[in-house]
Amino acid sequence: MRPGSVRRRAVVLALLVIAAVAIAVALPLRSQRAADVSARQRTVALFPAPGTRTAAPGTQITLRGLAPARMRGLVVRGSRTGPHAGRIVVHTDRAGASFVPDRPFAPGERVTVRAPLPVAEAGGRAATFAIARTPAAAPARASAATPSKASGAQRFRSRPDLRPPAIDVRTNTVPAAPGLFFVAPKGGSTQAGPMILDGAGRLLWSHRMPHGLQAYDFRAQTYRSRPVLTWWQGRFLGAFGAGEGVVYDRALRRIARVRAGNGYQADLHEFLLTPQNTALVTIYNRVRADLSPIGGSRRGTVLEGVVQEIDVATGAVLFEWHSLRDIGLGESFMAPDRKGAEPFDYIHINSVEVDTDGNLLVSGRHTQAVYKIDRRTGAILWRLGGRRTDFRMGPGTDFKWQHDARRRSDGAITLFDNRARQPAQGIRSRAVALRVDESARTADVVGELRHPGRVLAASQGNAQSIPGGTVVGWGGRNPLFSQFDARGAVVFDARFGDRKAESYRAYRMPWTGTPASKPALAARATARGMVVYASWNGATEVAAWRVVAPSGTATRALGRTRRTGFETAIHVRSRATRVAVQALGADGRVLATSQASRVR
């Protein structure tokens, strides 16, 4: 055999050996991955999650990832209360069901659940969690009533019952673009409640809140594939809230109320609807704790952060995550009250976002961290920022006392970086975008925005990414909201006329509304005829108004003018004893007609 042939054969044999070794290594790896996937598919998710120590006595037990018919094999037993019977609530997506016990569990007891399939993170079919030793409920703090004498309010002759804050627009160089502004003033002397403004900052809708209640997180969302308005409403309890989420349709009629499950009350910080017609809400859970290791009282109280996902149609809890299972008190940048008079708000959850992979991003203000949480099991996948960050934080990426962690369409995570909890000299809040590489575990700044007025927001605030820019609600005692273009220039800047009013967040979103209610008017006689004031609270498509006089079964047109704002004054040269107004669309079509009213 020639030497060259020998060498070629040797090379071929070596390559074959290498390939065989590679296949031998790869096959077990593939088999292991397949086994991992298969094992994951053969397990069910249980909530409250295994190892939770602070579940509510009235908790339901949720299983996700199995046919509802298999729930019949579920066995539930309390260490003190014994076996529990109950009813099954099938989830709307039929991907699981909730077991609702006929009677509550006892505070402090351990609950054992034996499931039909192995439970994720439990190591078998049996899983346990504990019921919290819940302290006495805190005394309710009534929300401040709106003073009778409003400062900086708008007033309307056709709707004297409305007195929302005036909007002072300082900058408006936004080219014609879709989207309306959504704010919810509170805390001032003017009317509290949701407001929709057009692109020039003019009022389109003002909603009066029931006495003593406030509104937070007002925006447009989608429910059952249709645009809706949503907000949280309830009582403000100092640093958090107790209330519910509400959903309104295009006709401004309430179509759903969303309450937290398991005996909790929904907190004000987040009310997010998902494409699966579920709602994500935050909860502040009061539980007993020995705080002496961190300088507090032995008989202390902790405000635990809880996130629930709720089936809007049935009220069933699909997911429930408790911060104390995975996030220690030592991760907080706050210190407990030594005497135990005030609960220790150690994490202060203030936003929940569905990430692009379906898992959850949760912002903890008092731990100064963002957490990625497995939506199936409740396990923490990583921490960004804080005392135990999993990322190498690049220059300028440190954030403090933040709000509103969101995933942007380009993959960046945006935050409203408050920077301080109290007014501080020389510190400015910012909206910041971070490029987060989850594989390399690095974080870098890719953009930041600051208000030209050197604003520091000690609390609240948000940063919403929109096509071509960002909308920032400056939060807290800064009654400001702004829009920046893609280059970071301010193209819209406005503030409430009531300088004491606040808005938790501000958004700009597409919305069209046609109220079920009729337009309103007020008319008075003048020396030359009449002036008629017309409005239609919540209507977005009105282009003009026409005044008509009823005459038997017909009407007689008296005058017409284009819409000039929330309320339009129409001057008519003729007179009548009774008049009505017609709202006209851009094509001249009558959208609605008011009731006839006497001319004063």
Image (tube, rainbow, N blue to C red):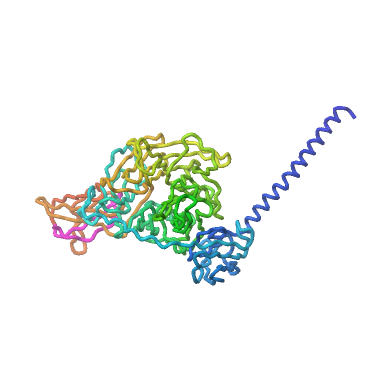
Q: Quadrant of residue 550?
A: bottom left
Image coords of residue 447 (percent x, y)? 44, 36
Is residue 114 highlighted in magenta?
Answer: no
Between 387 and 68, the one lying in front of the other is 387
Q: Is residue 42 left or right of residue 506?
A: right
Query: Is any atom of residue 95 visible in this view?
Result: no
Between 175 and 117, the one lying in front of the other is 117
The stretch in magenta equals 576-600
Q: Quadrant of residue 399?
A: top left
Residue drawn at x 78%, y 42% is: 20
Is residue 598 highlighted in magenta?
Answer: yes
For the C terminus, the image quarter is bottom left
Vertically, is 272 above or below 21? below
Image coords of residue 480 (percent x, y)? 32, 43
Image coords of residue 268 (percent x, y)? 39, 54
Q: Is residue 229 left or right of residue 378?
A: left
Between 85 and 71, the one lying in front of the other is 85
For the N terminus, the image quarter is top right
| Residue furthest top as drawn | 3
| Residue furthest left as drawn | 527
Q: Is residue 38 left or right of residue 107?
A: right
Residue drawn at x 81%, y 33% is: 11
Image coords of residue 332 (percent x, y)? 47, 47
